[in-house]
Image: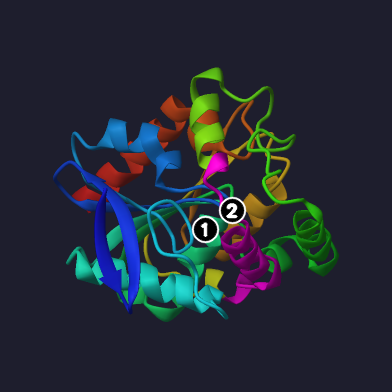
């Protein structure tokens, strides 16, 4: 892994390949390893970069009072430090919320967006009652109990090839950092950002996503000008791991379209 300092925080990231830059933004209780099948597949044509957000993987812990705006500012700072502006931003779940905040605060860093199985914040996409219930459930979990294969993340059993990866990421979750990130997601309502997006946008959703249902995808499609929605059959919330070939095919096709104008 490589490391860069952004506003006094150590940010770790994985980088491979050569070509137009694509930056991957992982979901909650994950780190850059969650994008392994995408980095492996797309490094043949693109510069692929996956960050460890503050508090995850090899990055520094989140400071006290860290907020959604801070995640966005540090991601934009990483992009500028690597001199890859503008680039394509690809996010999953919580990563979509971070990307939307990046677009609100730093639109110039984005050449295009890929938003997968995500939210305009839990409050924005699911409503306050569901957002509060999810956050309360997370806070009630004892230390070290996070289950990366919990029901609702996948349409069926977790993909066997990636169970060791999921378990490794889960073992490295820092409870305080996870709760900081997911509290930010629970409180966020970024629905107003969707209509302001003026770059090419690809939506990718699992047809059986129980965490961010297709109704959220259709709301994104309705609000984001020109957005295209690709639905992966028989797939749940973590679509990039449950159906990596289908996910990568959609992503590569979109990146070709963006590259070719």
- The x and y percentages for residue 200 are 37, 58
Which residue is pictured at 57% across the width and 81% down the height?
Answer: 65
Which residue is pictured at 71% across the width and 46% down the height?
Answer: 211
Pointers 2 and 1 in contact (C-beta within 8 Å): yes
* Among numbered discs 2 and 1, the one appearing first in the sequence: 1
Is residue 108 among the parts visible in the rendering? Answer: yes
Say how the picture is coloured.
rainbow
Q: Read off the magenta span.
A: 170-192
**Residue 98 falls left or right of residue 41:** right
Q: Main secondary structure of the magenta part?
A: helix
- The x and y percentages for residue 205 are 57, 42
Does the magenta run of residues contain 190?
yes
Tell me if residue 90 comes above or below residue 206 in the rendering.
below
Q: CA distance from mark 2 to mark 1?
A: 5 Å
Say the numbered circle drawn on residue 118: 2
- The foreground one among 41 and 112 is 41
Q: Which residue is mark 1?
A: 96
Q: Secondary structure at mark 2?
A: loop
Residue 3: image quadrant is bottom left
Neighbour class for label 2 at 10 Å: few (<14), some, many (≥20)?
Answer: many
The quarter of the picture where the C terminus appears is bottom left
Residue 194: image quadrant is bottom right
């Amino acid at each position: 892994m490589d490391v860069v300092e952004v506003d006094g925080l150590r940010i770790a990231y994985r980088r491979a390949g050569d070509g137009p830059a694509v930056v991957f933004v992982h979901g909650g209780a994950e780190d850059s390893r969650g994008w392994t099948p995408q980095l492996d597949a797309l490094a043949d044509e693109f510069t692929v970069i996956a960050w460890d957000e503050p508090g995850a993987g090899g990055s520094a812990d989140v400071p006290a009072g860290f907020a959604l705006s801070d995640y966005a500012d540090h991601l934009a700072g990483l992009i500028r430090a690597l001199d890859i502006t503008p680039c394509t931003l690809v996010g999953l779940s919580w990563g979509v919320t971070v990307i939307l905040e990046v677009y609100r605060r730093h639109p110039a860093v984005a050449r295009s967006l890929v938003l997968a199985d995500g939210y305009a914040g839990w409050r924005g996409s699911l409503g306050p009652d569901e957002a509060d219930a999810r956050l309360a459930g997370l806070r009630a979990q004892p230390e070290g109990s996070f289950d990366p294969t919990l029901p609702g993340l996948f349409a069926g059993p977790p993909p066997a090839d990636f169970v060791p990866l999921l378990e490794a990421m889960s073992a490295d979750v820092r409870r305080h950092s996870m709760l900081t990130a997911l509290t930010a997601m629970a409180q966020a309502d970024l629905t107003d950002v969707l209509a302001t997006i003026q770059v090419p946008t690809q939506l990718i959703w699992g047809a059986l996503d129980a965490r961010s249902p297709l109704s959220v995808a259709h709301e994104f499609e309705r609000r984001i000008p020109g957005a295209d929605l690709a639905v992966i059959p028989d797939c749940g919330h973590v679509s990039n791991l449950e159906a990596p070939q289908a996910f990568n095919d959609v992503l590569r096709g979109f990146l070709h379209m963006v590259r070719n104008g």
